[in-house]
Amino acid sequence: MKNLILVVADKNMHFALRGALSRPEALGIRPISVDFLVHPGRDGGVRKTGAELLALKRSAANHGMIVLDYEGCGAACPAGNLEAELTQRLVPKWGTNGQALVIEPELDVWLWGAENTLKTALSWNHPASIRDWLRGRGYVLGEHEKPERPKEALEAVLRELGLPRSSALYEELAGKLSLRRCSDSAFGRLRATLQQWFPAV
């Protein structure tokens, strides 16, 4: 039996979370065994049937989580309400061992960590910083210097560098960025849940 099974919206999310979970010490947890299920219906599919799909795997893991982007999931309610509603749908099968995580606006916001880490991971060699380069092209950076359109900003940077937007890149970035200092609230909830379930020895 695995420690944790996650139902996720796509391969990029799978690889990013795999990269993060491969660093238990940086998350403040003990090493755990993990399985992933990528929902064929992407974010909207996870919203509609992710809880039911995870319920089918109750005997395969001690803890379960469903993870989706708020952007593109088709929800009519705020992200926080959706997360609470989906978590409640996990209770009959999982009790307190199940959790939903809704990332607002989307997973890509987690990748916008420290400038030096990004520059190294992406082999950025422009004279301007990545964020200044984005500002010069009309991208708006909000709280903690994260782009308000994180996926589009990342795609623009990758186009400039001639790099593909691949799942492997998501895993590489998640394997290098600071997991202790990530300021995104959804990532903070993920880290807190994992620390509660799998405290460091």
Image (tube, rainbow, N blue to C red):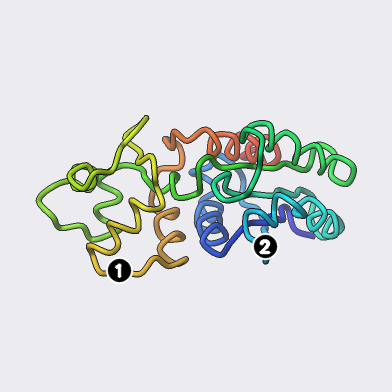
Q: Amino acid at mark 2?
A: Gly
Q: Is residue 95 left or right of residue 132?
A: right
Q: Is residue 133 left or right of residue 186?
A: left
* Residue at screen point 23% across, 61% down: 123
* Residue at screen point 58% across, 62% down: 10
Q: Which residue is the site of mark 1? A: 163
x and y, in percent, of residue 124 in the image = 20, 57
Using the numbered discs, state the Cα–Cα distance from disc 2 to disc 1 in whole angstroms: 27 Å
For the N terminus, which image quadrant? bottom right
* Residue at screen point 90% across, 42% down: 92
Q: Which residue is the site of mark 2? A: 41
Which of 81 and 123 lies nearest the eye of the viewer?
Answer: 81
x and y, in percent, of residue 41 in the image = 67, 62
Helix, strand or loop status at disc 2: loop
Q: Amino acid at mark 1?
A: Leu
Q: Residue furthest right?
A: 92
Q: Is residue 89 left or right of residue 112?
A: right
Q: Give the mark nearest the N terminus, 2 or 1.
A: 2
As displayed, is residue 179 above or below residue 35?
A: above
Which of 154 and 92 lies nearest the eye of the viewer?
Answer: 154
Helix, strand or loop status at disc 1: loop
For the C terminus, which image quadrant? top right
